[in-house]
Image (spheres, rainbow, N blue to C red):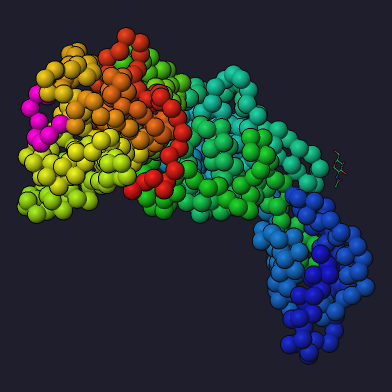
Amino acid sequence: MAKTLFLVASLLLLGNVSFLHASFPPSLIEDLAKIVMNNYCSPEKLVGMKEDIAAATSNTEVLNIPDGELLADVLSNGVQTTVSDPRLTVSYEPNYVPAVHPEMPPLPPEQLITILQSTIKLDILEGNIGYLRIDHIIGEEVAEKVGALLVDLVWNKILPTSALIFDLRYTSSGDISGIPYIISYFTEVEPVIHIDSIYDRPSNTTTKLMSMSTLLGERYSVTKPLIVLTSKNTKGISEDVAYCFQNLKRATIVGEKTAGGSVKVDKLKVGDTDFYVTLPTAKSINPITGSTWELTGVTPDVEVSAEDALATAIRIINLRAQVPSIIEESAILIANNYAFESVGADVAEKLRELLANGEFSSVVCKESLETKLSADLKTLSGDKSLQTATNTPALPPMEYSPEMYIELIKISFHTDVFENNIGYLRFDMFGDFEEVKPIAQIIVEHIWNKVVNTNAMIIDLRNNLGGPTTAIAGFCSYFFDGDKEILLDKLYDRSSGTTTELRTLDELTGARYGSKKSLIILTSKATASAAEEFVYIMKKLGRAMIIGETTAGGSHPPKVFPVGESNIFLSIPTVHSETSAGPAWEGVAVNLVSEYAVPSSQNN
Ligand SMILES: *[C@@H]1O[C@H](CO)[C@@H](O)[C@H](O)[C@H]1NC(C)=O
């Protein structure tokens, strides 16, 4: 370190050639270095300093700087650069009188109350939300004297609130011994928790801070939300409190990244001079992260400006108050509407368990709640179609001219006729029956008639993402004969408790392909929803050979349900193909006759 000190000083000296006499004791640098070595909180960062000191003692050029404050600045720069820690400073203060901390005199209660009221602000906000601001974190010694008063005047007013906002935005001082007190009021009596470890360099000892099993007054229930507000001025002990709460997952931190100070800073006199070293002499090592907030600061869970922190905290608490009813209503919707009754009941029950286990207690916004709910629903049901949804209002139907329809149809379908009069038809989604009906004639003329007279047909559904299932009966009908009605599938709708039979239609626009000519359907893992239903029917009835990858395992188009008044929506599959044994293809994908990838060169 001393080498660096010397280097910085020499550079500065080049511009100050007029210094002649050494104004400060030759031992200044050595004494300073020793103080740092014996007191700096991270001794591992000082490796090699002994050798540096030895080298520096023979070199006193820097001491020629005649001005104490200027020299202090040079030395500050030196130590900060060497240790890479801006919390280390050197000052020159001939008039400094070390603050003495006298035993607290026994103050009359009225005076104590006045003192407490000036450092503690208490409020009960709308919705029974407690607000507590503490600008100095008192230590054990003071707590013992004012504890009973604090419980009486402050804590007993906070206890009945349903959530608490703990404001540490202005807290830049405090005492290490106050940390276990604060944390313990928000955790359980049992088990005792290891909150933090403090390494103290002068004594070379590590102290474990444990939660306290006895406290004056009652604890704040662990199920009630706790939000800690921070700012860039939140410094020292208050940062430790925020960091411990965050890693114990007991509080959500809202506000700005904190200062990155230290749990303990001391100001030590250098030998017999008027120079002082201010440096962190202890450090926190969090038992959960094995790391620290010192130097880097605490990163909030929700980063907003200090001014917006309180309003944000109130929003989070209000949202959390709604969570139980949102989850309960979701559970009811799923139990009553999910296509497979037993799965729906099981998902509903497990969702309630997640709520009871506090799984939703850390949501910070509607989006995070939706994301979590969606992920949980997919995990619990194994059905990717059971999820939260956005309720985008349906667009008004477009007014297409016949020319526009023809263009649209031409780009939506691809046809070809290969060697040996084999037809090829590709389309990438299914339309709604009512929407398709008016343009059926156009589709027949521009698309269907190109492939209907082939000897065999390949229907390419590898990119077909599905859509409404209402047009499936009609589409299937082209591949059967007109003289015989065929039962294609039975669709059970859980919402209404009804079963609908899907049968071939006897009247179609254009000519049928009929039941005799060969049919091959191409699938991929992207083939989903209505396209899967079509593949499933054609395979079940033995009408087509299916070639390609196993399909997506989607569902019949789900229905969207509003969850109470929450403005959250659930997309729930309510219909399933009726088979005697479980899902036909929903969520499990259509089993294939043969399964091999089709070379892409065959793709039109
Ligand atoms: C601190 O104590 C440990 C043993 O607890 C010892 O190994 C180490 O050398 C000591 N460090 C200093 C700087 O005294």
At horizontal 57% and vertical 20% (from top left) the residue drawn is: 189
Q: Is residue 133 above or below residue 330?
A: below
Q: Which residues are magenta?
A: 505-512
Image quadrant assignment for residue 592:
top left
Q: Residue farthest to the bottom?
A: 18
Image position of 486 (left or right of 604): left
Q: Residue farthest to the top?
A: 580
Q: Is residue 305 above or below residue 189?
A: below
| The magenta stretch spans residue 509 | yes
Q: Is residue 17 above or below residue 134?
A: below
Image quadrant assignment for residue 432:
top left
Q: Residue farthest to the front?
A: 420
Whole-percent x, y for residue 91 in the image: 71, 66
Q: Compare residues 167 and 272 and report the one nearer the observer.
A: 167
Whole-percent x, y for residue 237 in the image: 60, 44
Image position of 395 (left or right of 121): left
- Magenta segment, principal secondary structure? loop
Image position of 392 (left or right of 284): left
Image quadrant assignment for residue 159:
top left
At horizontal 88% and vertical 64% (from top left) the residue drawn is: 53
Q: From where the camera sits, is residue 432 visible?
A: yes
Q: From where the camera sits, is residue 225 visible?
A: no
| The magenta stretch spans residue 153 | no
Whole-percent x, y for residue 340 in the image: 31, 16
Q: Compare residues 576 and 343 and report the one nearer the observer.
A: 576
Whole-percent x, y for residue 231 in the image: 48, 51
At horizontal 72% and vertical 66% (from top left) the residue drawn is: 81
Total numbered labels: 0
Q: Compare residues 522 and 299 and report the one nearer the observer.
A: 522
